[in-house]
Amino acid sequence: MRQALAISWIQFKMTVKSKGALAMMFFMPLILTLIFGVFVAGSGSTGSSGDGQVYPVTVADGDGTFAARKLVEALRQEPTLRLTVSDAAQLDKAVSDRSAYVGIVIPAGYQKGLNGGAAPEVQIVTLPGSNAQLSAGQTIRKATAHASGDYLLARQMTGDSADEAKLAAAYTTIVADRQAAGATVNHQRLKRETPQVDTGYTVATSALGFTVMFVMMLVFSMSSSILTERENGTWGRILTTPTPRIQVLIGFLLSFFITGLFQFTVLVAATMAFFNVQWGPLLPLFGMASVFILCSAALGLFLAGIVKTADQQKTIGMVVVIATSMLGGVYWPLEYMSPTMQKIGYLTPQAWAMEGFREVMLRGGSWAGLALPMVVLGALALIFMTAGLLRVRYE
Amino acid sequence: MKKVWLIAVGGLTRMARDPRALLMLLAMPMILIGILGVALKPMMDTPEFKPFDVILVNADAPAKPVAPPGTPAAVLEQLPTFEFGKLLQDEVLLSDQAKKIMNLKTATDLAAAKDQVINRKAVAVIYVAPTFSADVMAGKASTIQLFSDAGNPSQADIVAQVVGYFTEAVTADALAVMHPAPGQSGPAALNQNARDAALKGLPKVVETTAGARTKDVGAMQYYAAAMALMFMLMTAIARAATIIEERQNGTLGRMLMSPTAKGIILAGQLLGSVIIVVVQFVILMLGTRFLYGVDWGPTAEALLLAGAYSLAVSGIGTATAGWLNDAKAAGAAVGVVGNIFAALSGAMFPISLFPPFLRLIARFIPNYWALQGFLDQMSGIGGLAHLVTPVAILAAIGVVFGALGTWRLAAR
Amino acid sequence: MLRVQNLVKKFGENVAVRDVSFEVEKGESFGLLGPNGAGKSTTISMICGLLQPNAGEIYVAGVNVREHPTAAKAKMGVVPQDIALYPTLSARENLNFWGAMYSLGGAELARRVDEALEIVSLRDRQKERIDTYSGGMKRRINIAASLLHRPELLIMDEPTVGIDPQSRNNILETVKRLNSEGMTVVYTSHYMEEVEYLCYRLAIIDHGKLIAQGTLDDVRRLIGSEATVRLKVQNPDDTVCAAVAAVPGVTQSHCDDNAVIALVKDAADKLPALLAAVNSQGRKVLGVEVQEPNLESVFLHLTGRALRD
């Protein structure tokens, strides 16, 4: 076993000495987690309300009446909107140069329209392809419905009074009652194990996704070392030493595994320390990670048996990892995809890895929940390892 | 000028013979654009879900509005009975719209239903408490409980939204009951017609696009542009690795020894890179147009923008070659710079959601100008006038970095 | 120490090694000589277990390589033609690794590494990365990596390719010293002088076949007392060559770029006749060089080709 350990140790050492490998191991996933999980989602996003996204919104009030002012106020009170008030021209510019996610235009005659039953049009101004209809749009619709509904109710309550003070008092009462007596949904997320602190979902899934992808990428690129060694003669030299072939292979596989696990551990620790990501209980987490890394190593070995040069392995490996990561739900949850794409997604190891890691991070990580992903990944590892071992050339 | 051209062509020939370079140049972006487009289509366009299981535990008891004290018994008799839990089930959760999203199951045992969620047999349990209708009628705060699978937040949030629509409507009803018009009270306040008349003026919320944008930009278009730009940048930086190799194995030195001015040689290298990147773009544009039907907007404008971007990234590639010492580091820079620039330019996430300092950083990145330029062209805001800013900035980036890189390379 | 019997290796249609047999005694220094592509490296690869022969057997210190590869490999130290080291690691790190590959460890390994570094005189630079070394230093570490387990048999496959003369001398002296200390050495090269300097016995291989085998003197004797005479002539051609060949005592002749080369018995006596032969073709001899019988001439004699073609 000494030889196998020596091989894995020297491979590991060379990897951590290489700047390129280090960039791929740590710099990339941490930077991307920082960008997507923290900057973009808004830091300190905790709690269970989906992602902690805050949308910069510009509003232009073309009416200026009581009802319009109340609408602006209602929008301002939405925690997921960050409101800037400006005029219509500025608003268009802000949306065009991407400083506002959406613009909201309250048309002139808004209040008059409400009063006359003529249903005025509030505009949401977006850029094509920016999908404002998703959560920001819903929030805006809801706030508009509240503000206008409450205004109409206040008007009815005061008997269509023109006295703004009266109207304001009634409006305030209604808003207070909405707070006090409204029907609400109390959303609680169930975990299998004892409840624990919720992480911001976006930062957690970003960290998880990038970790999974870059661990796999590193393991794949490392597995090209078999080919590099063949190219520069060290592979042949190892075979001239009295080291049994099985030890040579175990040594290389072990080096992929150790390096992958090392990277995973550092990334977990770093995201915990810097981004407060909760990875869940450690034993199931590392159990899951081990199976996943083993599976990646086996796939890498298999790939190394197919391609001819280390360069090919690195390039094809990168294409394969990025492509399968997209299919496997690393970039966005599989549930967002059509049923057919989901089925395709579950052909990738990443889908099972994400499944397992989410079980650990979000559901508390019970072995019962981990059984299926671990068995699938283990089986994939076994299949590809056998296929890879059969394909490795010794001559 | 002929020499510049010869040097450029030499570089092109070497690249065309390198299968790895070709793979990165063409195959990889096409695959990624395809996957991104296909996978994201349902998410970006119309959400298409495989209906998932949701359990309703409805313990709600019918309730009558609370009448003011002293209301005659006969009137009390006439008060209608409300059953909000049943309303939620029949009108909301079993509506045609909701059926596309979820399969509703009903149950009576809340604990058992929660177990089902924990065991991932269902995404969520909706629990309506026995006093829900009564609380609403009495003007008290009322709550519908939602217990969801912590491991499946995205679908759980959809359920929460649907139930949220319902509680909104219930709240509106309750508020109307609590705040009747003068002279009306009790059952009269529940007069549906009167209330409908009052609420007829509720505003419509419509969506429009900023500027004179007339066309929508689909997911496929968005990613085609974003990915094409990312790979063009990667190609340009990968060229830096080649230049470094040439410097190391002496070919560059040999060229510099020939009676050709340094500037011409380096301009040749830069031109070679620009041509490669433009060719890559043209192939990607044609490929995505014919394979995935991507509309890139007017061709001339797209090419102009691509040309300016190619100059910018080639300049950055040259600068990379000037500052980095070994080809391996440049190889690593391909992935790192490529991905991070793409992320910062809004290729993966809308840039308007970035905090201000990241938006500021984005403005120093060529991908940003090119991507926003392409999106504008795609959304029909065409015309050369709109291209002046991005093209000028991209060209400036190209010239500045190209000159810096050339200066460094020549100095070595 | 090493017995190679009727070795055959085919790559598809191409027969790289045909029926090669030779033996190396303990303590001997044996040269395997041949031009590039003659089958030297293929033979060596089979001896050290990298390639499986299509036929034939190999015994290292009595151990059959095919049947007991691990045991046989433990007795051999192999210096590959490539610099098979990890360039980003230091010399010492490399040696530690290769020592571990021969099951060495702990203090023993450290001692052997020191010893090997001492042998190749690179102890003071052991902490530097291999990729900062000169070609000659890399070659020396390449050798040191094969000495760690004190092999009974040291197999060197062209260990001096592409380095400066000084480093080459250093390496040759090292090998000579190791051999004189009792290590059996098999040395392949296409440099005659190296084999002449190092080896007592040798085999010459060409096109996969052994064409001569024996002690240095045996092999030299194959061409008797023939010396190689180099007559420098401007633009030598076939007519000059034929004229030289016609001189009695000339057994073979051929031309290269600027000379006619002839194998001649009793060269000193024949020189005037050779010069006359050139002159008779209206050419002038610009210089004459007489080389006493050596391997170069043996090879020429046996194959009609120069070794470095």
Image: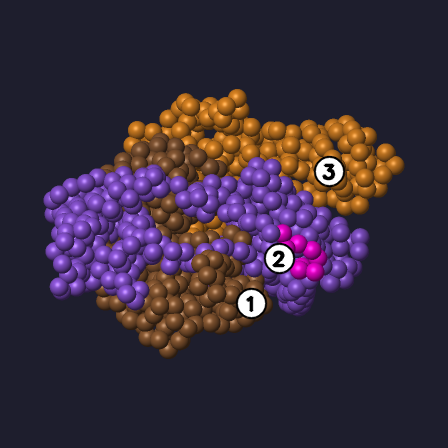
Residue that carries the numbered disc 3 in the rendered image: C256
Asked if residue A364 lies left or right of residue B335, the reply is left
**Label 1, residues with CA under 10 Å away: few <14, some 14-19, many ≥20:** some
| Chain A, hue in figure | brown
Residue farthest along the right direction in this orientation: C282
Q: Residue at x 30, y 36 (%)?
A: A380
Q: Residue at x 63, y 52 (%)?
A: B380
Q: Can you tell which chain is drawn purple?
A: B
**What is the CA distance from the residue labelled 3 to the residue labelled 2?**
81 Å
The answer to whether residue B95 of the structure is visible from this angle is yes
Q: Can you tell which chain is drawn orange?
A: C
Q: Which residues are magenta?
A: B380-387
* Local secondary structure at mark 2: loop
Residue that carries the numbered disc 1 in the rendered image: A88
Residue B144, image x, y percentages: 21, 54
Q: Is residue A229 magenta?
A: no
Vertical placement of B329 versus C52: above or below?
Answer: below
Residue that carries the numbered disc 2 in the rendered image: B212
Which quadrant: the C terminus of chain A? Answer: top left
Q: Closer to the camera: disc 3 or disc 2? A: 2
Disc 2 marks a residue whose amino acid type is Ala
Whether pointer 3 and pointer 2 mark residues with C-beta atoms closer than 8 Å, the reply is: no
Disc 3 marks a residue whose amino acid type is Asp
Same chain letter for marks 3 and 2: no
Between A73 and A127, the one lying in front of the other is A73
